[in-house]
Image (cartoon, helix red, strand yellow):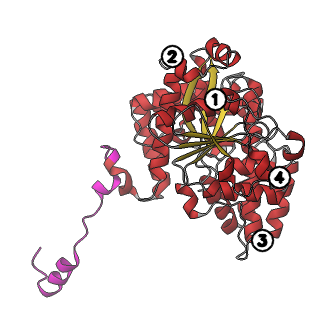
Amino acid sequence: MDINGNSPLLSEPEDINRPIWAIGGGKGGTGKSFFSANLAIHLSQLGDKVLLIDADLGGPNLHTFLGIKETNVDLGHFITNKVKDLKDTQIPTPYERLNLIKGTENVLFTSNLNYFKKLKLIRHIKAFNTKRVIVDIGTGSSYNCIDLFLLSNPGILVINPEPTSIENAYYFLKSCIIRLLKLQVEQYKIQDLMKQVADQIQDTSKSIYSFLNEVISHDKFYADLLYRALTKFTPALVINKVRDEKDHLLGQSIVNVVQKYLVTNLNFLGVIPFDEKVHSSLKNFEPYFNNYNHSNVSASIKSIAKKLKNIQNGTSKD
Amino acid sequence: MAPQKTEDLNYYEILNVGLSASQQQIDKAYRIGKSSYSHGSMALYGLADEKERQATIEKIEEAYKTLGNIRKRKKYDIIILKKKTGDCETAYFRNSTEKLIIEDGEIKQSLWQQIKNIFHPQEK
């Protein structure tokens, strides 16, 4: 809590204008880093100044997608206080207007960030005034991943059309929602509700709305408060490695189901088709987007980027 | 607005469309709903049990049978709008050309007419 009793992890009104897009999703191997890197390349080619941050503390890869092998400075230097300002860890890339903060190789000492280091990282990320900041938060639903995801506007889930990926995405979303509710409850010091939220965390209950209905029966005012906080959480969804037509309908189905069971409005941005050339590009250390700029994959990324910019413009204040 | 259970949702809500949705929008919503709650749907994986899924798909089918038919939809709209506005008979007249009960009711005199009748009782 800060001096006014506000949680530093809760969004402030000016956050709505910050162009921070966090890419997450729970499961590994869904294409988050591929999507982050190629989205950043595309936006930089459109003329935007872009900063790509590899916040995958357990397994950074963005530098590989951009064709960068060795660097003198990375995120680990900031986390271990060797560098004071996060801005000083930026490195140029082969792409004009695109800078990278490379993920740390000191995985053992930096992948388990303590609370204050995480707050420091979030504070520095928020301070960037670059046009676009894309943060690859990596795999899992740890507090660090979730808090970085909640920082963004919007957070983008990248999943595959497979039950395992969808299941992990739902765990991730539930974790985000429960984290949001917990922060609100701590903010307003609602002791009884804190206990209910804690029970919900331990419970394997499937439905957030049944939890909210229970809260309504106890205290309508705070239930309304929590519900309003939830409605501000509007992550986006991308389905990667799509192979057939049915997978296109899957996105709408997931939006439908998440709205009903998790009381969350997902924005479905689109699908990215499966392409064997993605794999071969990576093996050859070649940038996919530049070499296959007219492929269906690149067309999908361009379309998703346009929708993201529209979402950003829709919520920006003049 | 509080989140609702499947059994409390009306046909529009279960298909996630507005009251003024076109037939095309209803058809699309039905396809998405059917896909979302079909047996083995990936979208539902880990979120709902078989009982809940079955109840929801049945309600979606029911909703589409009603909203997909113009006459049935019109009758259903009257029920929905009546519920929204309580017992007010005049509330739904813009959406229906059916005869309203108030058409056979007494014509009420305006206040001015009543005052005139006090001073000039023979005038009508």
Structural crowding at the residue carrying mark 1, measured as other residues with C-alpha within 10 Å and reported as few (<14), some (14–19) or many (≥20): many
Q: Which of disc 3 and disc 4 is earlier in sequence?
A: 4
Structural crowding at the residue carrying mark 2, measured as other residues with C-alpha within 10 Å and reported as few (<14), some (14–19) or many (≥20): some
Give the residue drawn at x 50%, y 36%. A43
* Segment tinted magenta in the rendering: B95-124
Asked whether A312 or A75 is in front, the reply is: A75
Callout 1: helix, strand or loop? loop
Q: Amino acid at mark 2?
A: Ser
Q: Amino acid at mark 1?
A: Leu
Circles 4 and 3: CB atoms closer than 8 Å: no
Q: Quick check: is B123 in the magenta stretch?
A: yes
Q: Which of disc 1 and disc 3 is earlier in sequence?
A: 1
Asked whether B16 or A146 is in front, the reply is: A146
Give above or below for A244 relative to B76: above
Q: Amino acid at mark 4?
A: Thr
Q: Chain of mark 3?
A: A
- Of marks 3 and 1, the one in the foreground: 1
Which residue is label 3 attached to?
A189
In the picture as drawn, the residue positioned furthest to the bottom comes out as B119
A306 displayed left or right of A194: left
Which residue is label 2 attached to?
A295
- The answer to which image quadrant residue A27 occupies is top right
